[in-house]
């Protein structure tokens, strides 16, 4: 396993749509995923997409732990708000409702910054897991946000291009001046 170098905003690999993984069980895909997980953990990120490590393939890893979920939710709702460390190969997202939610995002490819991004609050996603199994889940809250953020990387999009108010693109060290929500981990 290895910790991989993370591409930063401006590198063309981050602005290019990623390719479908033709053989999800290939040894090089398994190696890539293991290295991506290690890189994400090393960088203390909530998620990582393959283009961020200079590999233009449709692979993401992410996690949405309990401590990031809104404590005000019911147990059933919290279930949709959390996800264990997850690998998705060739993921697809379906928006489940009109509700839009804003939240602070960061990105390991845009270090030091946070931006307020509005996204669909309720989604379903599907993809293949590390062992080729189909993963299908409904997601809300931070869980829905991190999956959309990672899948945006596969379309060559970074979160600033989703922002509607660039006055809310700030340095993370200044986030205390905003009272709405605490900053989220970068992904
Ligand atoms: Ni990112």
Image: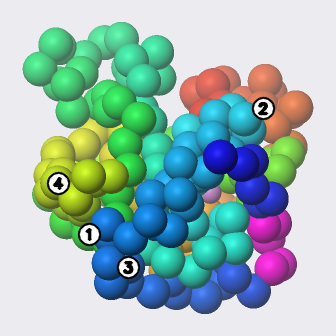
What distance separates the C-alpha of mark 2 from that of mark 4?
A: 39 Å
Question: What secondary structure do most residues of the magenta stretch adopt?
Answer: loop
Horizontal and vertical percent for residue 73?
A: 25, 17
In the rendered image, the vertical position of residue 86 relative to residue 176, given as above or below: below
Relative to 62, is 161 on the left or the right? right
What distance separates the C-alpha of mark 1 from that of mark 4?
A: 15 Å
Are dots 3 and 2 in contact, CB under 8 Å? Answer: no
Q: Secondary structure at mark 4?
A: loop
Q: Say which residue label 2 marks.
A: 175
Are dots 2 and 4 in contact, CB under 8 Å? Answer: no
Are dots 1 and 2 in contact, CB under 8 Å? Answer: no
- Select label 1 or label 3 by which is in front: 3
Going 31% across and 12% down the picture, which residue do you hit? 72
N-term-proximal mark, 1 vs 4:
1
Q: Which mark is residue 21?
A: 3
Q: Secondary structure at mark 3?
A: loop
**In terms of image quarters, where does ligand 1 lie?**
bottom right
Horizontal and vertical percent for residue 142?
A: 42, 37
Q: Secondary structure at mark 1?
A: strand
N-term-proximal mark, 3 vs 4:
3
- Select label 3 or label 2 by which is in front: 3
- Select label 1 or label 4 by which is in front: 4
Q: Say which residue label 1 marks.
A: 92
N-term-proximal mark, 1 vs 2:
1
Q: Is residue 61 visible?
A: yes
- Select label 1 or label 2 by which is in front: 1
What distance separates the C-alpha of mark 3 from that of mark 2?
A: 38 Å
Q: Say which residue label 4 marks.
A: 133
Asked which colour scheme the image uses, the reply is rainbow
Q: Residues within 10 Å of mark 1 (few under 14, many from 20)?
A: some
Q: What's drawn in magenta, residue-wise?
A: 7-11
């Amino acid at each position: 396993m290895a910790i991989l170098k993370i591409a930063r905003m401006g590198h063309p690999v981050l602005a290019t749509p990623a390719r479908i993984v033709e053989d999800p069980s290939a040894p090089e895909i398994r190696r890539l995923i293991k290295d991506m997980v290690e890189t994400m953990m090393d960088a203390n990120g909530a998620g990582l997409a393959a283009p961020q490590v200079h590999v233009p393939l449709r692979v993401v890893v992410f996690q949405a732990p309990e401590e990031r979920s809104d404590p005000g939710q019911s147990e059933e709702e919290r279930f949709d708000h959390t996800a264990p460390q997850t690998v998705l190969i060739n993921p697809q997202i379906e928006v489940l409702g009109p509700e839009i939610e804003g939240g602070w995002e960061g990105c390991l490819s845009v270090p030091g910054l946070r931006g307020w991004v509005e996204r669909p609050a309720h989604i379903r996603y599907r993809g293949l897991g590390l062992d080729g199994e189909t993963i299908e889940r409904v997601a809300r809250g931070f869980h829905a946000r991190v999956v959309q953020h990672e899948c945006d990387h596969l379309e060559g999009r970074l979160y600033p291009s989703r922002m509607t108010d660039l006055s809310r693109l700030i340095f993370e060290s200044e986030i205390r001046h905003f009272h709405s929500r605490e900053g989220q981990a970068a992904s």
